[in-house]
Image (cartoon, rainbow, N blue to C red):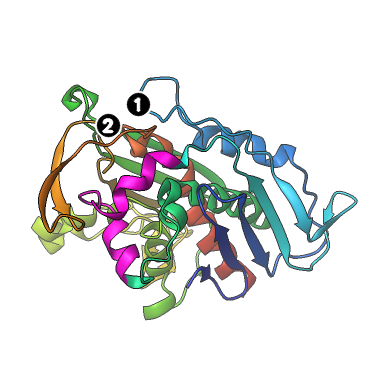
């Protein structure tokens, strides 16, 4: 399904080369000041960079409020925000119906939807759908208020990048100001909710909190993290701000491993379903060479959405 959340429910819709993409947010409290200007900074951070690693597709990405806002304030009704798609070149994707891109969702989309999935621009599987997710994150940050502060960055080994190829990266996200006590044991733990959202971001291959996978190679005496004050702060924040699924008052820290982009210019081998055998695929069109560069603000959105839902319960 395309919805997430309980008290703050996020539903995304649209396809990459359809008329628009958007999000409906249910559970937004009334009386929050909201305008298009509130979205500019985070949307700009998601936009392709001028470093040569991003797609040359350019969209205005101006939010249009369909419902839930009146006279500059949220009304308490479901908030729907849309973004037009204008700079589309759908012909670049015709070949993928017969020759699915290695590592991409082309094949499984065809199977799941019986050949009816919109393949243009990767359709509903496109990174274009992270735009409404970022918009939801903007609203979530508004719900949480100024006590919460978010920051993020990506580490990319650009020296590994070769002509016609792509690279992955690691995205780090931190939230300060979250009080102790948010979250539930087991299925609605902070980690499980954030990870659920993070793995909904196209290209994410791993998520960790605090020491993460490194904890598997530690002794208990190394990983255990002494509490150092009455506020519950710990010496190293080894658990990334969460114990037992519940925030402990430290900064919430998590990281995402983001794969290299599947759509590369270099020739690749894949199965040609029209011919019934392996064939050479040469991908044309406009594609990011490193999607990790655009993911920090999306990671913030995932964390903010999870925390907003928990804070409203």
Is mark 2 in CB contact (under 8 Å) with mark 1? yes
Numbered disc 1: secondary structure: loop
- Disc 2 to disc 1, C-alpha distance: 11 Å
Query: On the rendered structure, is 123 left or right of 37?
Result: left
Quadrant of residue 154 in the image?
top left
Dominant secondary structure (helix, strand or loop) of the stretch shown in magenta = helix
Q: Mark 2 sits on what residue? A: 156
Give the residue furthest to the top.
51
Q: Residue at x 50, y 68 (%)?
A: 2
Q: Which x, y percent locates residue 148?
A: 58, 50
Q: Residue at x 41, y 72 (%)?
A: 189
Q: Mark 1 sits on what residue? A: 53
Q: Residue at x 39, y 57 (%)?
A: 198
Dot placed on the residue nearer the N-terminal end, 2 or 1:
1
Q: Which x, y percent locates residue 161?
A: 20, 26
Q: Which x, y percent locates residue 8?
A: 62, 69
Residue 170 versus residue 10: which sits nearer the camera?
A: 10
Q: Does the image show residue 105?
A: no
Near mark 1 (Cα within 10 A), the count class, few <14, some 14-19 or many ≥20, is many
Give the residue furthest to the right.
71
Residue 224: which numbered mark, if any? none
- Of the 4 image quadrants, the one containing the C terminus is bottom right
Q: Which x, y percent locates residue 225?
A: 27, 58
User: Where does the magenta region start and end?
Assistant: 91-111
**In the depicted structure, whether residue 157 falls above or below residue 4:** above
Q: Residue at x 25, y 40 (%)?
A: 260
Is residue 119 a member of the stretch shown in magenta?
no
Residue 94 versus residue 154: which sits nearer the camera?
A: 94
Q: Nearer the viewer, mark 2 or mark 1?
A: 1
């Amino acid at each position: 399904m395309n919805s997430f959340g309980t008290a703050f429910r996020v539903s995304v819709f649209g396809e990459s080369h359809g008329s628009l993409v958007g999000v409906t947010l249910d559970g937004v409290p009334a009386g929050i000041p909201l305008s298009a200007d509130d979205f500019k900074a985070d949307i700009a951070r998601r936009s392709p960079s001028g470093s040569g690693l991003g797609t040359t597709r350019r969209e205005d990405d101006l939010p249009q409020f369909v419902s839930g806002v009146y006279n500059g304030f949220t009304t308490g009704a479901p908030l729907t925000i849309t973004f037009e798609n204008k700079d589309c070149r759908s012909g670049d994707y015709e070949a993928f119906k017969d020759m699915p891109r290695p590592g991409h969702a082309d094949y499984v989309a065809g199977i799941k939807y019986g050949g009816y999935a919109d393949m243009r621009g990767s359709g509903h599987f496109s990174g274009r759908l992270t735009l409404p997710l970022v918009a939801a994150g903007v609203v979530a940050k508004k719900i949480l208020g100024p006590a919460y502060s978010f920051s993020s960055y990506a580490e990319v080994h650009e020296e590994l990048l070769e002509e016609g190829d792509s690279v992955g990266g690691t995205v780090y996200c931190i939230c300060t100001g979250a009080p102790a006590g948010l979250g539930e044991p087991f299925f609605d733990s902070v980690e499980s909710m954030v990870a659920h959202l993070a793995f909904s971001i196209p290209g994410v291959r791993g998520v960790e909190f605090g020491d993460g996978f490194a904890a598997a190679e530690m002794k208990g005496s190394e990983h255990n993290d002494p509490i150092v004050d009455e506020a519950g702060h710990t010496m190293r924040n080894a658990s990334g701000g969460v114990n037992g699924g519940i925030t402990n008052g430290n900064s919430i820290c998590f990281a995402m491993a983001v794969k290299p982009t599947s759509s590369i210019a270099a020739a690749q081998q894949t199965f040609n379903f029209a011919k019934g055998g392996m064939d050479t695929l040469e991908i044309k069109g406009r594609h990011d060479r490193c999607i990790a560069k655009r993911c920090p603000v999306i990671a913030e959105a995932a964390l903010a959405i999870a925390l907003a839902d928990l804070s409203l319960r």
